[in-house]
Image (cartoon, grey):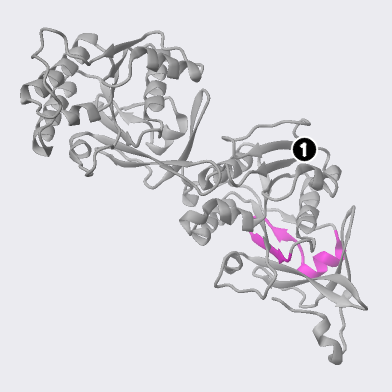
Amino acid sequence: MSPELTRILTGVPELDAVLRGGLLRQRIHLIEGRPGTGKTTLGLRYLIDGIGRGERCLYLTLSETEEELRATAANHGWSLDGIRIVEALPLPPDMPGPQTLLLPTESELSALVDRIADLVDQSGAERVVIDSMVEIRLLAHDSAHYRRQIIALRQRLSGAGATVLLLDDLTSDGREFELQSAVHGVVTLEQIERSFGAARRRMRVIKLRGGDFQSGWHDYVILTGEVLVFPSLIAQEHHRPGPPIEILSGVEQLDALVGGPLATGSSTMILGPSGVGKTTLALQYALATVRAGHNVGYFTFDESETTLRSRLVAHMGGGEDASIGQGGGGGTGEPPHRFFLRRVNPSRISPGEFIWNVRRLVEDKGARLIIIDSINSYLDVIREEKSLLLQMNELFSYLSNMNVMAIVIGAHSAQLDTSKEPDALSIITDNILSLRYYERDNVVRKAICVLKKRQGRHSHEICALHLTEDGVRIGARIDVPDDQAGEVPLEA
């Protein structure tokens, strides 16, 4: 590889993955975003990684003081020892006299640019962060003046042999692209406020001149001591060889109704109104998978760990519990076995983080069955994107490529309407199991039927469904006299 295309790691492994190996060495990169998006944190993480590799690092600040930077690092538990911090403003006394910001002179801006370039040259630093470019913009007469000085700064910095991060606040009234056009790489950070819950942070690489990168938006979170990036999922990049497996539910009548086992690589949707037994049915397949010696990942948006344990989880030989939505989650409780329970907080998680956690169970724990309970609550996570079918189709394709079976639970109370979410998801799933209530002899009862199975034949009968502490039991076919046909509502 030619020297100009060698890479330098950022200190954030998943960001390096998005950048296909890191930033371009000895090139200038722009990190831009509104205040509060984490530019300074990312810059510090980049320099701290450099110190760990024995490289010389320089932080040139035009806005914050050294004391403020050290306080920011201390909040993350980081030490800035070894990083040279220089406050580039105000200019030294031997520089041109002060000018007002209302009527700046070209010599004042030129002097600042020269000072920045001289400090980088004199330091001999291999990694440099300049924070922030908005201070330089304020000194410029107009966009043409600003662009000339930026080009001059780029030329000086390019000869210094350092890999430079320029931080920009995007605080100007009119969006200008002088910086984007002048640098070699651009990463944009964005923060989206929700009507309720935590703000969502996401990033994208706009350009990386001469280098490959993963395009699109990628969610990220900033936690104490770390920055976590969740690269968007590209299903075609992931494959796991190995023989497929087929899972019977362990209930003979249910397997006869479904037409046999469910196969890895397939997706199944369980539909029905609230309380009809969708979770119990999904857990029945989870139990059968665990007993067959395979790992299961269960993501629940709606039910507490206590409620799930009162059903079938206790039969699975323990599990690992974690809360998802606080930045990646972690295990607590009993040691991990084959059943991995993840409770998801919809108001604290982004779509990218959720899919990343699914990937971790598949790739790190070897899960062969993933259950999402329920898709209705997952809709609340991605509502602002309005892309349920696109995201779920990519997720199903990924799971299929990885030889994993997917079960998605969806609640609905009216007739199945594939033009609306979440029922629209039934179009791209391989199998659909429909649960519903019916009334007989003034008693509310439950029924089950199979609406669709792409990979084989299935029964078209509507059978009674009974829920027990040990799982599900399928009763006889429901026969209704013609004059009482209304007793069995066929919502689907």
Q: Can the viewer see residue 265? A: no
Q: Is residue 441 left or right of residue 304?
A: right
> At which x and y percent is residue 304?
75, 45
94, above or below 295, in the image: above
- The foreground one among 73 and 340 is 73
- Residue at position x 52%, y 61% in the image: 389
The amino acid type, in three-letter code, at marker 1 is Gly
- Is 272 part of what is drawn in magenta? yes
Q: Is residue 411 left or right of residue 22?
A: right
- Residue at position x 7%, y 25% in the image: 105
Span highlighted in magenta in the image: 251-273
Q: Secondary structure at mark 1?
A: loop
* Label 1: how many Cα within 10 Å (few below 14, some 14–19, many 20+): many
Circle 1 residue = 319
Which quarter of the rendered picture does the C terminus lie within?
bottom right
- Residue at position x 53%, y 41% in the image: 198
- Residue at position x 81%, y 80% in the image: 488
